């Protein structure tokens, strides 16, 4: 892979300037915004869209007159789905291009690889994807969902509305599914589910032959109790997984599958007719009906010149994150990272699902949780949603290691892992 | 006047009848409107009320609702059933069943259902369609009753059994009846034990589910014991079938490996070129299928079922021509320098991937399955999907054709001659550079064919080939370099071993174990399963 990325980096032009300021705006240098998403390699399928949405947001902001009287300028780099390269590219953005903020990363491992760079160079990172929690960092703003804003409500929904008693936790073998499943397992046991009613299964990235695993799930599901699959399967492996479910005749009525990483974009490559009724839990669906969302979809389809282009949850997270950053910069009157970090806590902007999302002191945002069922047209129908917005629990109360920790980046605490029992900053898990 | 009296009577009778149908229609109207309003809880009640009305329209309306085909037309608030026809929906008035024009999906509001409602509808429709004139519908009704036993339907089911003539449907009814008896709390003990035997003889996974639920819910100790015993019998027979199923899954995986590896067996096995861009040839084949399907979808939708057959020669040509171009422009300068070939083709694979990504975009492309490749059939308790079966057949056909080509044609003879002894072949008047190019083209073309098949089971994305390159090399090395038959045996063996390990060790550990096994095996037999013997080895 290393060899590959070097070659690829050579191939892909390093900096792509978009929305370059016209000569008329000569008075002040533009504010640079870094975009750190893979445009090649395995993650390109998901991350390219996020780069496009950022370019659109920056263009729109410039049409509104820019920020602090200056134009915004996007600096796009390609970390090529290569985790160490993420750190190199982040350093390049912060040191060479001197960007005011970076929007980027998808997988947890890429985020973990850039963390030290942002800490060292005091940069700002907006991370738009749902993740496993157990982290809060001064320089990072988590605009995706923590487990309690996605996984736990989904399990609650299945337990209460579909009376599920047996659980298959299926995931791709890396940090996000492993941690999420650990939290879910603890939560289910707390709810009185017996260990023999929980099956955990991990598969490698890009797993394509699902025949025996799906047969295994079917077998597990024929024990006379209602069974559901909680899927943290990521990326490309989802398509053959869903195809195999259809092949083996597993209908949503019998064994529903609720997924945390399958959005409109992932469904675009599948015929969804056999999958009608399988579920996904997100904080946003394209099918949500409200004026803000409709305007966004229209703007997006016009920007990409493709009337069929879909929108999804991580895109919404970038919209929220970008607007929060803009508000915080206006409030602080500068793009200086320390000033923005102080100013951004408490900033609230409209999200696309209807409501105002606020940046909390733990650097996570408040979100509504939506459960949707897959429809024949590749969209989701919301069948349930939380009555209000949920505050993220970045440290899970269900894991013994993190249940005593809280994060609060306001003064005077200024700590990402404060242990409420010992009263000291720097608890376990750091 | 007297002759008018009967007429008056007739008229008044007619009026009464008309009025009655009008009120009935009005009733149906409100029942159907209730389906489309309120929360999911209200709709649940509405479904029950509609089914209880006994109206003949209830079944089609509920079926459409369950399938997501029930819509409300916002312009006049009529409830309509929409049947997709191309991009349009052909509408039918839900209440009268009369045609109501056409509309696009965006113009209508779909009546939303969730899994619970879908299940409830299946259950209700199951008891409504027991007397349907269509035997297939009756069997489906019996199946859904079996899966979701609703004891209230017992009376209707008994009536249906009495009227049933078709033997297979009758058997299905009998099984459903047994499931209903087991689910009902107030049936006598001996009837329940009888029912257990019926369900046990069915012997599939659903039967096991029913038996286990019966064992869990039984209050009577005898019934509980009998249910447990019956579940045990079913479980045992299923375990045997499971082994058969693993063998089938293994063969199926093996056929995929064979398809991916067989082209490599030629370029790597007989020519000795380490072609890291082999996976990308597979990918090109898959994208060719996509393009063919796109053209067929827009120009000639009636040909859709033949799309894969049309794509086969094209995929072979595209991948083959690209292969020949690669051989002529890069590889021929690197013969005898394996490390350089490896690096050059690896770089090339990245170039091809990024090129495809730039042209088609990074997201997956949908390649549909023709009708003859979708669906499943049962062999005993074994579920065989047509798609997988066709891929196995196709892999064997490609293998056989290739064997014939190598053994029986002049081209095959030249190829074997050049790979065995290049200077001698050249001395005999064979144009070795041309044969090299053709051999490489053949190997690549076959990879393209594999791409057509893989487009049916995997993602058509720029990364498609990457996932197969390691496995392909593994198969070729394990089977014996230079031996096509070894590739066949190697692919099947690895497929089956993998599928037997997966349920016990998990997919990740299973793969590791297979890899360790191959490393150890290669230590013992460096030339693989079927080593080439004779002078050609040197």
Image (cartoon, grey):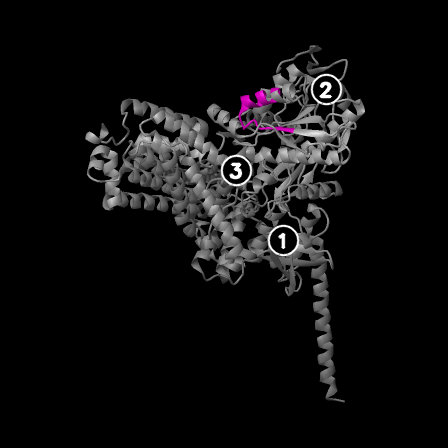
Please check whether the numbered discs 1 and 3 fall on a single chain.
yes
Tell me what residue is drawn at x 45 percent, y 54 percent: B305
Q: Quadrant of residue A53?
A: top right
Q: Nearer the viewer, mark 1 or mark 3?
A: 3
Where, by quadrant of the figure, is residue B32 drawn? Answer: bottom right
SS assignment at label 2: helix
Q: For this view, does B69 lie left or right of residue B531?
A: right
| Label at residue B357 | 3
The quadrant in which the C terminus of chain A is found is top right
Q: Residue at x 30, y 32 (%)?
A: B479
- Which numbered disc covers residue B65? 1
Determine whether B185 is above or below B170 in the image.
above
Residue shown at 52% from the left, 49% from the top:
B146
Q: Nearer the viewer, residue B70 or B333?
A: B333
Q: Which mark is residue B440?
A: none
Magenta stretch, residue numbers: A75-91
- Residue bearing the label numbered 2: A337
């Amino acid at each position: 892979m290393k060899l590959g990325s070097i070659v690829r980096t050579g191939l892909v032009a390093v900096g792509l300037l978009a929305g370059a300021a016209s000569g008329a705006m000569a008075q002040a240098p533009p504010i640079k915004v870094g975009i750190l998403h893979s445009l090649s390699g395995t993650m390109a399928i998901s991350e390219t869209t996020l780069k496009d949405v950022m370019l659109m947001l920056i263009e729109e902001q410039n049409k509104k007159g820019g920020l602090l009287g200056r134009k915004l300028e996007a600096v796009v780099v390609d970390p090529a789905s290569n985790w160490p390269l993420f750190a190199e590219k982040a350093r390049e953005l912060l040191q060479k291009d001197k960007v005011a903020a970076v929007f980027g990363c998808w997988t947890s491992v890429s985020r973990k690889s850039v963390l030290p760079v942002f800490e060292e160079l005091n940069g700002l990172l907006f991370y738009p994807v749902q993740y496993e929690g157990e982290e809060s960092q001064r320089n990072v703003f988590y605009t995706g969902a923590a487990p309690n804003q996605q996984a736990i409500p989904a399990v609650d929904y299945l337990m209460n509305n579909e009376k599920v008693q047996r659980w298959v936790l299926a995931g791709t073998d890396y940090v996000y599914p492993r941690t999420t499943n650990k939290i879910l397992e603890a939560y289910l046991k707390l709810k009185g589910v017996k260990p023999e009613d929980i099956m955990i299964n991990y598969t490698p990235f890009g797993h394509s032959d699902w025949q025996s695993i799906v047969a295994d799930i079917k077998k597990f599901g024929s024990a006379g109790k209602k069974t559901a699959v909680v899927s943290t399967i990521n990326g490309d492996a989802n398509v053959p997984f869903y195809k195999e479910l259809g092949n083996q005749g597993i209908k949503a009525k019998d064994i529903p599958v609720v997924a945390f990483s399958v959005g409109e974009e992932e469904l675009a490559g599948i015929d969804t007719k056999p999958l009608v009724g399988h579920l996904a839990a997100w904080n946003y669906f394209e099918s949500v009906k409200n004026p803000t969302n409709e305007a966004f979809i229209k703007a997006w389809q016009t920007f990409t010149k493709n009337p069929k282009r879909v929108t999804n949850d991580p895109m919404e997270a970038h919209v929220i994150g970008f607007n929060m950053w803009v508000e915080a910069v206006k409030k602080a009157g500068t793009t200086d990272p320390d000033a923005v970090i102080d100013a951004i806590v408490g900033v609230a902007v409209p999200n696309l699902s209807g409501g105002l999302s606020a940046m909390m002191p733990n650097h996570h945002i408040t979100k509504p949780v939506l459960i949707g069922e897959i429809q024949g047209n590749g969209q989701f129908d919301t069948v349930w949603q939380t009555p209000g917005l949920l505050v993220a629990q970045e440290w899970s109360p269900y894991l013994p290691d993190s249940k005593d920790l809280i994060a609060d980046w306001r003064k005077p605490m200024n700590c990402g892992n404060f242990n409420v029992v010992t009263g000291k900053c720097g608890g376990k898990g750091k | 006047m007297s002759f008018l009296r009967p007429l008056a009577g007739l008229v008044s009778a007619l009026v009464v009848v008309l009025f009655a149908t009008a009120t009935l229609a009005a009733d149906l109207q409100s029942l159907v409107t209730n389906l489309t309003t309120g929360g999911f809880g209200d709709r649940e009640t509405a479904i029950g009320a509609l089914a209880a009305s006994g109206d003949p329209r209830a079944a089609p309306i509920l079926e459409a609702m369950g399938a997501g085909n029930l819509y409300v037309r916002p312009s006049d608030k009529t409830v309509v059933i929409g049947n997709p026809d191309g991009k349009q929906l052909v509408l039918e008035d839900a209440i009268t069943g009369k045609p109501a024009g056409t509309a696009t999906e965006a113009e209508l509001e779909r009546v939303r259902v969730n899994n619970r409602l879908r299940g409830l509808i299946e259950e209700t429709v199951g008891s409504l369609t027991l007397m349907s004139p269509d035997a297939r519908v009756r069997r489906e009704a019996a199946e859904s009753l079996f899966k979701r036993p609703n004891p209230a339907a017992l009376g209707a089911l008994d009536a249906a059994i009495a009227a049933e003539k078709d033997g297979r449907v009758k058997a299905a009814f009998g099984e459903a009846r047994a499931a209903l008896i087991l689910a009902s709390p107030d049936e006598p003990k001996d009837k329940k034990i009888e029912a257990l035997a019926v369900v046990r003889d069915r012997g599939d996974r659903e039967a096991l589910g029913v038996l286990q639920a019966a064992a869990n819910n039984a209050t009577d100790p005898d019934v509980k014991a009998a249910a447990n015993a019956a579940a045990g019998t079913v479980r045992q027979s299923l375990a045997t079938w499971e082994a058969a199923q693993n063998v089938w899954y293994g063969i199926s995986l093996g056929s995929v490996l064979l398809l991916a590896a067989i082209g490599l067996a030629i370029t790597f096995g007989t020519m000795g070129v380490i072609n890291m861009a082999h996976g990308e040839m597979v990918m090109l084949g898959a994208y060719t299928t996509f393009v063919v399907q796109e053209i067929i979808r827009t120009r000639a939708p009636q040909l859709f079922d033949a799309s894969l057959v049309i794509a086969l020669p094209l995929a072979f040509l595209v991948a083959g021509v690209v292969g020949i171009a690669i051989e002529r422009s890069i590889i021929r300068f690197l013969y005898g320098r394996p490390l350089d070939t490896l690096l050059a083709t690896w770089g090339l694979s990245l170039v091809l991937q990024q090129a495809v990504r730039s042209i088609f975009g990074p997201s997956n492309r949908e390649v549909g399955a023709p009708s003859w490749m979708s669906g499943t059939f049962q062999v005993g308790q074994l579920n065989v999907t047509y798609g997988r079966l066709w891929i196995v057949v196709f892999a064997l056909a490609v293998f056989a054709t290739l064997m014939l080509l190598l053994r029986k044609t002049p081209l095959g003879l030249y190829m074997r001659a050049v790979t065995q002894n290049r200077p001698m072949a050249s001395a005999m008047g064979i144009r070795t550079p041309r044969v090299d190019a053709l051999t490489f083209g053949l190997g690549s073309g076959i990879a393209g064919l594999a791409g057509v098949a893989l487009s049916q089971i995997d993602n058509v994305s720029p990364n498609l080939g990457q996932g197969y390159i390691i496995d392909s090399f593994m198969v070729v090395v394990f089977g014996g370099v230079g031996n096509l038959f070894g590739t066949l045996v190697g692919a099947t063996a690895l497929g089956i071993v993998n599928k037997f390990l997966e349920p016990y060790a998990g997919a990740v550990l299973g793969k590791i174990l297979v890899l360790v096994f191959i490393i150890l095996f290669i230590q013992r037999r460096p030339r693989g399963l079927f080593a080439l013997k004779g002078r050609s080895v040197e």
